Each structure stands twice: as structure tokens, then as C-alpha cells.
Image (spheres, rainbow, N blue to C red):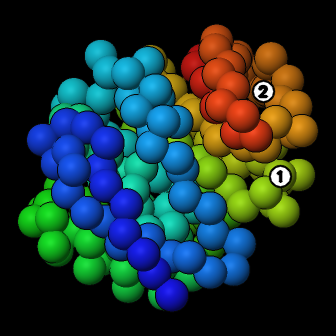
């Protein structure tokens, strides 16, 4: 089952995107997306953006809308991947995107072909204990460019340390039950 939400800003503002409304899929709220892109606005223009646990792709789509050069989406739920590909086609942005149908941990457990300016990870809340695995792989396999940013969306009950491996938290923003933690080298 799907429904629609709107892109919150950029050149695709108010365009509709289909999102899954089943199982454990949560959609990053518009307020959270808008705030996040306001915070990282200077980094987004011309960036390589990686959207992990992409779902229907709204965050990576917003990155393109705000000026990212390329968004790569990693998702392992076939219905979400189909919806994501449909969204990219309907918005006419397929040439700036790549969809990878794979488990995030399997994807991250290797040396990347390209490094990213911004990595956004929004694992399902039941995988909260695996957030540190995401950070570990990003750190150990050098997925981030040296001046890149890792953003983790998580539940407020999940407390993330200020320093994880070589990454340091430089900002944390709360939005009700949702928290965004921002890390850099």
C-alpha cells in the first residue's frame, strides 16, 4: 500500500512522491527533511549523496532537488525499490540517480568505487542496535570524503556517542521522537 507526500524544497518542491505505508517503513517527516537540508545546504550543491535504508527515496530525492549532483539509494525491500524507481522516472531525475537493490550492511562491507560528500542513514527502529555497524563500515571502508558528513536518523531513546571510531558528532537535532545526529572526521 502506498500514499503520496510532497518534496519539501528545491527545484522539485511540492512534486508528489509515492511512499510505502506498510510494515516497518517510516517516512522522514517534512519538518525533519527541511531542517536537515537547511543545516547542510552549503554541502549539498554538487554533492554525491548516499541514502541508506532508502525506502521510497524521499531523502535522496530531496538531495537532488536541493542541488546534489548524484544520489545513490540502497534498499533491500523489492516493493520499495519498485516505488523508488517509479518516483525517479516520474520526476525525470533518473540520470542523476542510481538504485541499488541490496542489504545495506552487505553493500557497506566493501571498499567503495566512489566516496560520498553526504551519507544519510535511517535504519528501521528495530535495527537501532546496528547503527554502530553502519558507522563502523563507513569509517573502516572510507565511504565518506575527508570533509564529508554522516547523518543518522534515529529514535530519541537511542543514544549515540559523541565519538564513534574516527567520526565525531558535531550536531544533534531533536524533532519529537526523531533525532538527527551529524558526524564528520
| Residue 105 seen | yes
For residue 128, the mark is 1
163 up-or-down from 139: above or below:
above
Q: Nearer the viewer, residue 150 or 106?
A: 150
Q: Quadrant of the C terminus?
A: top right
Q: Nearer the viewer, residue 17 or 95?
A: 17
Tell me residue 66's x, y (percent): 23, 35
* Residue at numbered disc 2: 165
Asked where in the image residue 150 lies, by quadrant, the reply is top right
Q: Residue at x 83, y 52 (%)?
A: 128
User: Is 66 left, or right, of 117 in this rendering?
Assistant: left
Marks 1 and 2: which is nearer the front? 1
User: Is 180 left, or right, of 159 in this rendering?
Assistant: left
Q: Residue at x 70, y 39 (%)?
A: 178
Tell me residue 25's x, y (percent): 63, 69
The numbered mark, 1 or 2, whose residue comes first in the sequence reads 1
Q: Secondary structure at mark 1?
A: helix
Q: Residue at x 52, y 36 (%)?
A: 32
Tell me residue 11's x, y (percent): 12, 41
85 up-or-down from 136: above or below:
below
125 up-or-down from 137: above or below:
below
Amino acid at each position: 500500500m502506498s500514499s503520496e507526500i510532497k518534496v519539501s524544497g528545491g527545484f522539485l518542491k511540492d512534486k508528489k512522491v509515492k511512499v510505502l505505508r506498510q510494515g516497518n517503513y517510516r517516512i522522514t517527516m517534512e519538518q525533519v527533511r527541511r531542517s536537515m537540508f537547511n543545516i547542510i545546504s552549503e554541502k549539498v550543491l554538487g554533492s554525491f549523496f548516499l541514502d541508506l535504508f532508502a525506502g521510497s527515496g524521499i531523502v535522496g530525492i530531496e538531495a537532488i532537488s536541493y542541488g546534489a549532483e548524484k544520489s545513490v539509494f540502497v534498499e533491500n525491500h523489492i516493493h520499495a525499490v519498485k516505488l523508488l524507481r517509479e518516483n525517479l522516472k516520474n520526476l525525470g531525475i533518473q540520470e542523476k540517480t542510481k538504485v541499488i537493490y541490496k542489504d545495506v550492511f552487505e553493500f557497506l562491507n566493501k571498499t567503495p568505487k566512489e566516496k560520498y560528500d553526504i551519507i544519510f542513514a535511517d535504519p528501521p527502529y528495530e535495527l537501532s542496535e546496528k547503527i554502530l555497524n553502519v558507522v563502523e563500515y563507513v569509517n573502516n571502508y572510507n565511504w565518506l570524503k575527508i570533509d564529508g558528513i554522516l547523518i543518522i536518523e534515529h529514535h530519541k531513546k537511542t543514544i549515540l556517542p559523541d565519538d564513534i571510531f574516527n567520526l565525531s558528532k558535531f550536531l544533534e537535532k531533536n524533532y519529537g521522537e526523531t533525532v538527527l545526529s551529524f558526524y564528520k572526521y
